[in-house]
Image (spheres, rainbow, N blue to C red):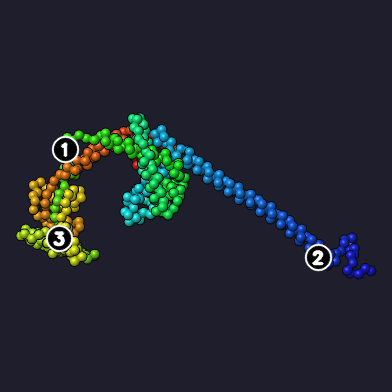
Amino acid sequence: MAKENKTQENNGQKVQTKYERKIEERKKREEKDKRDAKLMRIGVIAACFLIAAAIVGSVAASALRKKAAISDAYITIGSHSVTKLEFDYYYYLMKNNYMMTYGSLLSYMGVDATQDLEDQQYSGEMTYKDLFEQLAVEQIRQTKALADDAAANNFVYDDTEDYAAILNEVEVNAEAAGTTVNNYYKLSYGEYATEKNLEPFAKEGLLAGKYYEYLIEQNAPEEQEIKDYYAENVLNYDRVDYHSFAFAAETEDEASEEDVEKAMEDARKKADAMKKAREEGKGFQELCLENASEENKAMYEDGETDASLREGAYHSSIPSVMADWLYEDGREEGDLAVLKDADSNQYYVVEFVKRYYDEADDGNISNTISSERVLEYIENIMESYTITDQKGKLKYLTIEDAVES
């Protein structure tokens, strides 16, 4: 009989020893490890190919987007195809100018130019993004119309000096912003903007602006036209010199209507007293000093300037309650009045000095007349410059259509 540690036959089957079973299991594990390693290598290689393909695809897609932005029509205005590059140039131009002009007011209203403007409401159904798109399109329409009209009328303009000034301004602004010129173009005019590809748009804008100035000069009115216009718009151009001092009603923030009325009555009495003292011969500035609050006294103490006197004021720049009185027919030098300003809860003491027309405003009237003429002319030539939104991106156009409907 064989020993246990030798291979035996049992019912026709081969029986393995413990040692042989361990050897076989080890071989199986090694084979499995080799298969797993091979599969892993295949997976890594495949993943690398996929990543590479994704990168190539992303670069290709980016290149296609850039090519489309620079070459393809984004919108059509009249007979002109406008690319996304050109549209973005005007969009950012309008946005930047608008923010520069109204930035403080917009910030006060809660508008944040650093955030998505599509989520910030302008009015009705329009967002600030819609507004700047509308402004951009209208600016492009006007620029194209003026440039075409300039060419049709053989208007010639050398833009060398003005374009050099633009390039210099970009360099100065880029340095002030702490960035490169190339990066400044992208930050200011869109991701595909460069000095080279924006040059045609900038020069076309210069041409349109210079041609506009030419039209203004060509439409200047005659002297008699200026006089006639002044006669029809006296209140817009007559100026006045006058003294004034305000007595504000002294009330608490949560004052009742009765408290406000009492404070207004006190202010009126002070104003009446000042008017009477002035009629008795006391100087207006001297009386201002007597009645001014401690923090305002210094402005009336200067002997060389009269803080109570305002000279050359237009009707539109004066609080309405005073303007109506100052511009009444028959007003004479030295006339005095106490005037109630219910909207601001105060009384004014006002003294009329004189009313007059400054012939320097002939130039302003001339510019107004010629501007009105040129504006009408531009509106007429712009009529054929219709907008076609091939991409369906201009939401403001659908809003306008809905409003018209």
Q: What whole-number distance in Å separates the C-alpha atoms at marks 1 and 2?
A: 118 Å
Give amino acid for label 3.
Answer: Gly
Residue 312 visible? The answer is yes
- Lower sequence index among marks 3 and 2: 2
Residue at the spot x=55%, y=44% of the render? Answer: 60
Where residue 58 appears, as percent x and y from the top left, is 55, 47
Q: What whole-number distance in Å separates the C-alpha atoms at marks 1 and 3?
A: 40 Å
Residue at the spot x=42%, y=54% of the render? Answer: 178
Give amino acid for label 1.
Answer: Lys
Q: Residue 210 lies in what quarter of the image? A: top left
Q: Residue furthest right?
A: 1
Which mark is nearer the camera, 1 or 3?
3
Residue under circle 1?
Answer: 227
Residue under circle 3?
Answer: 303
Residue at the spot x=43%, y=47% of the render? Answer: 185
Provide the secondary structure element on which disc 3 rests: loop
Where residue 87 appears, as percent x and y from the top left, is 42, 42
Residue 22's label in the rendered image is 2
- As displayed, is residue 222 above or below residue 39? above
